[in-house]
Amino acid sequence: MKNYLDWKEINTVFLDLDGTLLDLHFDNHFWLKYVPLCYSEKHKLSHEEAHEFLMVRFKHVRGKLDWYCVYFWTRELGLNIAQMKFEMSHKIAVRPEVREFLQAVKDVGKRIVLVTNAHPASLSLKMKITALDTYFDRIIISHDIGMAKEHDGFWKRLHEIEPFEPVQTLLIDDNLEVLQSAEHYGIKYLLAVLRPDSQADEVETLHYQAVHHYNDVMPS
């Protein structure tokens, strides 16, 4: 893995948040268990009915900017999603070795940019709890770009506000569609995440090298 990352050639590091720097267990638990529970109680449905309805609705929106929008789901479901995330915030956790990795990248003088699909309300809560924002040179959210990272046009728009040289850029992201989009744009160094949710199985990463322990990709 260390041979794959030529840190002498990397100037910019783009990092995803959920599933990459943070344990995806929070988001999976929230959307797959807590939201169906609250939806079933509010709308007088069985848990099975609520879960089935929501899975269909989620699939229809997945990958679009609305999928990541707290306000969209608040309107759609009649639930206070921001408040519910606060109620479950004790489950928000930084992945092992992430802080050490971020500090090491800063110490060797690389530019670190958080590039996330997370809605501003979710991002604010997670930064308040983790304080990871202190490591970033800049934070860019897809809601400001106007499209999710999965779309090919995202990276061109990002380049307009955050100049970078694709062949000297590293992106770490647990979303394979995002990695494919970045690869299509020309970003050279791409890492997937082997187990985004610490309480779930390892995931398929296609042809992408995958990080499991951040110590394995630490700049020397």
Image (cartoon, rainbow, N blue to C red):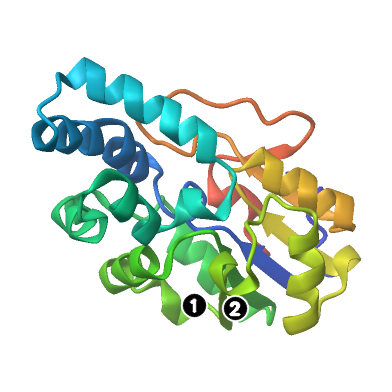
Residue 110: mark in rendering: none
Q: Quadrant of the N terminus?
A: top right
On the rendered structure, is 78 left or right of 24?
Answer: left
On the rendered structure, is 73 left or right of 108?
Answer: left
| Residue 14 image position (x, y, % from top left) | 66, 65
Q: Is residue 18 visible?
A: no
Viewer-nearest residue: 158 or 48 = 48
Q: Is residue 40 visible?
A: yes
Amino acid type shown at disc 2: Lys
For disc 1, the neighbor class at 10 Å (few under 14, some 14 to 19, many from 20) is: some
Nearer to us of marks 1 and 2 is: 1
Q: How many marks?
A: 2
> What residue appears at the point 62 percent right and 59 percent down from the top-left corner?
218
User: Regarding mark 2 in the picture, which secondary structure is present there?
Assistant: helix
Viewer-nearest residue: 203 or 98 = 203
On the rendered structure, is 67 left or right of 1?
Answer: left
- Vertical comparison of 52 with 88: above or below: above
| Residue 39 image position (x, y, % from top left) | 19, 36
For disc 2, the neighbor class at 10 Å (few under 14, some 14 to 19, many from 20) is: some
Amino acid type shown at disc 1: Tyr
Q: Quadrant of the C terminus?
A: bottom right
| Residue 89 image position (x, y, % from top left) | 21, 55
- Vertical comparison of 81 with 196: above or below: below
> What residue appears at the point 17 percent right and 21 percent down from the top-left corner?
47
Residue 130: quarter of image: bottom left
Q: Earlier in the sequence, mark 1 or mark 2?
A: 2
> What residue appears at the point 39 percent right and 46 percent down from the top-left corner?
23
**Residue named by callout 2:** 106
User: Regarding mark 1 in the picture, which secondary structure is present there?
Assistant: helix
On the rendered structure, is 119 left or right of 37?
Answer: right
Do the residues bearing badges 1 and 2 touch, measured as CB atoms within 8 Å? Answer: yes
**Residue named by callout 1:** 135
